[in-house]
Amino acid sequence: MLLLYNTLCLWGLTVRINFKLIISGVLFTLSSNAFAQFNIFTCEPEYAALAKELAPDARIYSATTAMQDPHQVQARPSLIAKMRQADLVVCAGAELEVGWLPMLQMKAANAKVRNTDLGLFFAADHVETLDKMSNVDRSMGDVHSQGNPHLHFSPPRILAIAKALTEKLIQLDSDNSRDYQQQLERFSSRWTLASAKWQEAASKLSGMKVIAYHSSFRYLFDFSGIEQVADLEPKPGLPPTSGHLAGLLKQANNSDITAIVIASYQDKRGANWLAEKSNLPVIVLPLSVGGNEQSNDLFSLYDNVFDLLSQEYSAKKL
Amino acid sequence: MNNFHFFPNRLSAKVSAALAITALVPMLSQAQNSMPTLSNPNVSVILDGYYQSEDRLMTERAEGFGLGETELALSANIDDMFYGKFTSVFESHDGESEVHLEEAFIQTMALPNGFTVRGGRFLSDIGYLNNQHSHTDSFTSRPSAYRAFLGGHYFDDGLRVSYIAPTDTYWLMGAEVFSGDSLRAADEHGERDFDSTGVYTAFTKIGGDIGVESSWQLGFSYLRNENGQLTAEDHDEDEHEEEEHAEDEHDHAHSASYTGKNTYAADFVFKWAPNGNYKYQHLTLSAEYFRVSDFMLPELHDEHEEEHEHEEEHHDEGHAKDYHEAWYVSGVYQFSPNWSAGLRYGELDSQLQHEEHFDQQELKETELSLAWHNSHFSTVRLEFSHQSNVGFEQAENDNVITLQYVMSLGAHGAHQF
């Protein structure tokens, strides 16, 4: 009888200990995931890279990779789950994500990231965009009235966005404001230094003529004085057609175009066909961080893009 | 205060209609230019027209030329707490036009801890397809499971509470209460005392990614229908009812053809795109299973059992079950931004009340669809479907060809997964 009682007691003790373990385990998981770490959800990998520079301790998740078209993203379960937990959502804005971000916000039921007064940040709100249009019609294709949203290849704009994003981080997480300020200073000085180097590389590219796919590199070309003489897309967002490519071939044969430029996520078939017929090289530029092996952060992304363009342009000039 | 009656009563209706239209026109033109605001809501119109070579069972599309779900939708954030949406649907079949309200709901946007409340008229979140608008479908008609048990898609007046867990794996839970009018069992004599709040649902969905290329979602739903059970039919009105049934199918295209007390559903979706890039190629596989049980009132059930035994003694065929079930599997592949193709197969296994016993019915459908997309906003679809059935009145085993366009203008809402 006593033995049985002892056994029961021991069993009860074990159960209690295990229960405590479970409770503390759950609490620990909750605190480490939901409370302690600042959660940043970015729409594109360039903003994940920027967030990493400015808030290295945050938990950062990017909804897309450089191999994916940021216009066309599925409002998939994993993204809803990630946005549900976010303290801050960072996106390009200017309607780039209009086809999926509102659905994610609706489904994620996270009031913190619903509008830009709180934890929503649109990069395009803080800089001047190029190619704003006063009158947009669907027959023009997939154009954005608020200007070109592919902002991230403009060194001065990235700096302005970094400053605004730091302000947002401080607004939301004021306890760490000194850290954010320090990170911004560190980033700014590195970026300014690198920008001088990129400016020099860009000046050598001035006057280069390319055929490109979509307006993905509008800001890069603007910064470098590269002229996009034609687009592989007949209209923004529409895939190349054979008729349109034939027209481009004529144009390619009659002018001093250096290369065909496409982004890492874009279909290579149209570009390869045109390259074969016109003897022009195809340059596949990383759309963003992670677009090729060399592009691991914003700095190496820029370095790599200028390397790739300079190689072709100097080869052409020789 | 008579001075304030500027317009005679008859005129004022017309005038206010005209005012509404003039108010709508600038909204339509502004809708694309800037983000929607209170004074500038999202306005969208879906145009859907078709030609179909034959009639199909339980579909809203009839033989010949017709309009599918042509919808006008307005939506906007009402303030920082509420979002609202209004969707009206215009349909035409057999030369008759119908206008009905598919959505008119408000939804909370700022409740804490992942809770959302939606009230008004809206699409129920049971199953996979039900909460999606039919213009996003890859086939011209919903699978037979939806047509038979939910009247195509189930929308109703009610309330929903949903909760999304703060986990890396998507986990949604929700419950709904509806009036349930469109899911009421047939009531030949109009003398049944139906519950005014007839439908209760509960659902959960989980989902996630597998690497960067694949995503999945799994859902389970339960629907309890207090008014779903059948009453006994009278013998002598036999022929009458046959006619009534036929009429019913046209009059209440949005009512369920088969109802029961308990409905269980499971759904699974898998999507894949190379590198997770949906611009060029992607694949969607989906499957759903529905089981509707307890479709008879208990006293009828006993009779049915007797009848059943009786039947077995005399002839071996007619082996009626005490539940309806239906399922489908579908695969859709977009092989270029301009072209996509889909294949779907579905079966419906239902029991039709006939005097005091139930006759087993079976419908098998295979659909092959090919769609051309000039852009995200315009689709022209050609569909071949083959239906073979046992036990359905006025239905032949047919090959049906449907040619359909679905186009959207104005602000276009984001698609669901």
Image: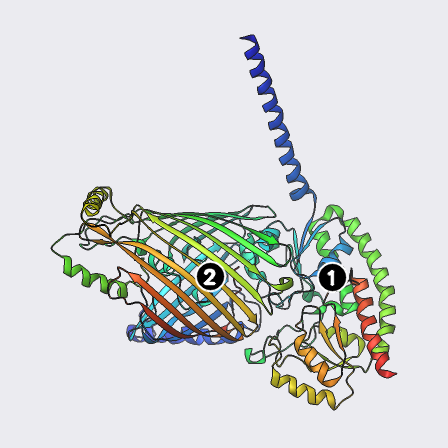
At which x and y percent is residue B51? 37, 76
Residue identifier under label 2: B330
Q: Nearer the viewer, mark 2 or mark 1?
A: 2
Q: Which mark is residue A40?
A: none
Label 1 CA crowd tier, 10 Å (few <14, some 14–19, many 20+):
many
Rendering colour mode:
rainbow
Q: Nearer the viewer, residue A260 or A84?
A: A260
Q: Which mark is residue A290?
A: 1
Q: Is residue B362 left or right of residue B305?
A: right
The disc numbered 1 marks a residue on which chain? A
Residue kind at label 2, given as amino acid type: Ser
Label 2 CA crowd tier, 10 Å (few <14, some 14–19, many 20+):
many
Query: Vertical placement of B201 versus A261: above or below?
Result: above
Q: Could you say which quadrant of the image residue B298 lies in?
A: top left
Q: Could you say which quadrant of the image residue A37 lies in?
A: top right
Identify which residue is drawn at 65% across, 39% down: A29
The disc numbered 2 marks a residue on which chain? B
Specify the farthest residue to the top. Answer: A2
Specify the farthest residue to the left. Answer: B236
Q: Nearer the viewer, residue B227 or A108?
A: B227
Query: Vertical placement of B110 versus A218: above or below?
Result: above
Location of the N terminus of chain B (image quadrant): bottom left
At which x and y percent is residue B14? 33, 75
Q: Nearer the viewer, residue B300 or A75?
A: B300
